[in-house]
Amino acid sequence: MSFSADKGLSAGDSWVGTVVAIQANYYSVRLDDSPVMLLCIRRALLKKMGQQVMVGDRVTVEQPDWQGERGAIANVYPRQNFLDRPPIANADQILLVFAIAEPTLDPHQLSRFLVKAESTGLAITLCLNKRDLVADTVVQRWQKRLESWGYHPLMVSIRAEAEVHSSLTSALQDKITVVAGPSGVGKSSLTNRLIPDQDLRVNTVSGKLGRGRHTTRHVELFELPTGGFLADTPGFNHPDIVSTPEALSNYFPEIRQRRESGTCQFSNCLHRDEPGCVVRGDWERYQHYLTMLMEVVQQEKVRSHQPDAEAAEKVKMTEDGKRSHEPRLEAKKYRRTSRKTRNQAFQELCVDLSVAGDLEDLEDLEDLGL
Ligand SMILES: Nc1nc2c(ncn2[C@@H]2O[C@H](COP(=O)(O)OP(=O)(O)OP(=O)(O)O)[C@@H](O)[C@H]2O)c(=O)[nH]1
Ligand SMILES: [Mg+2]
Ligand SMILES: [Zn+2]
């Protein structure tokens, strides 16, 4: 008799679950409403159809072997969204983690991460960790400051267990959350705290790959005791802002709010020195906006004057080892561009492996099927 029959998980011979990890050609699938985790292969038909399976995918598993805890994925449900790096489907939100000290909280860096996170279109939960390292007055000052930016940060410390649980648990419940933020801020420490059975690498030499420097490598969804999943990601320190000049203003809550209560004279206002602008003014991050605007205006100039569009894609190609040897075909070029618009923001927010590590690391990850 099967465990599933006891639990009444499904009427037929197929079950629905979430892919939580991938190693080589095997997929770990956590079945819904059951403690069962099955190691699955992908049905030949899916392979033939070129249907990839990603961490975060919702899948149907057919005819599981309950004793051997094995199964076969027969169907992948349509994705709500997906990202390349880390490769995760169906994320609900980004948990952006910064430390209030050690490393020093740099407002410009935080601003860049926030803009990057906003540009993915996903919900953002901002969390400032290591509050144990500073006085309460400093915590309150940051709280106020970030509220003026339009965010409501959770102030936590892994040294104060109750805090981590009360404030973060409800923000994460029943969601797939991707943890992002600079290196050393405590992303893995927080994840470990929230999921006590897991032991993610915290600031130690990476076990599997035998290398230090960046501690988090593996892409995997960890199940929260209260429901939902967390994906820890490696930290990196300087996200690129990829946006059109026109879209950039959408990524600042302060600007969104100003545009709700007023209208700029020109519909294509970039909020620099145009007359009748309702955005320009004396608010803290206006300078951040102008700096990032200069950057994306510059990017656009480079793009539009690029004699060989392929060259503009070059950086993207070297970031992604697998694609670096593709022939330069028009059709592929087009495909890359469209993929870029869909995913680039997310990729770069979560991790850029070519920044986080060296080529050898990338090859190791590919060996592991990541
Ligand atoms: N004082 C204090 N130290 C903390 C806290 N959280 C994490 N740390 C320490 O900060 C260091 C870095 O923590 P990690 O969890 O490895 O940081 P990470 O963000 O995962 O780093 P990467 O994986 O490199 O991106 C470790 O030495 C932790 O013990 C905290 O709340 N307070
Ligand atoms: Mg880490
Ligand atoms: Zn304006």
Image: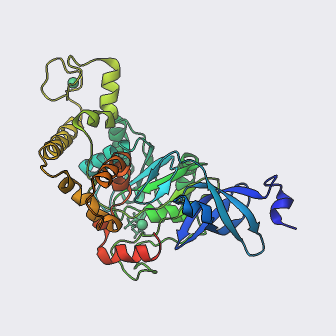
Q: Residue 257: give x, y in percent of width and height.
A: 34, 26
Q: Nearer the viewer, residue 120 or 76?
A: 76
Q: Is residue 217 left or right of residue 15?
A: left
The quarter holding residue 255 reads top left
Q: Is residue 274 left or right of residue 345?
A: left
For the point 74% across and 66% down, the residue is: 64
Look at the picture and state if 40 lies above or below 8.
Answer: below
Asked if one can make out residue 159 in the rendered structure from this viewpoint, the answer is no
Q: Is residue 289 left or right of residue 188?
A: left
Look at the picture and state if 25 lies above or below 276.
Answer: below
Q: Residue 162: give x, y in percent of width and height.
A: 56, 55
The C terminus - image quarter: bottom left
The N terminus - image quarter: bottom right
Q: Residue 52: give x, y in percent of width and height.
A: 52, 60
Q: Quadrant of ligand 2?
A: bottom left
Asked if one can make out residue 251 in the rendered structure from this viewpoint, the answer is yes
Q: Nearer the viewer, residue 21 or 339?
A: 339
Q: Nearer the viewer, residue 220 or 15?
A: 15
Q: Nearer the viewer, residue 159 or 61?
A: 61
For the point 34% across and 51% down, the residue is: 335
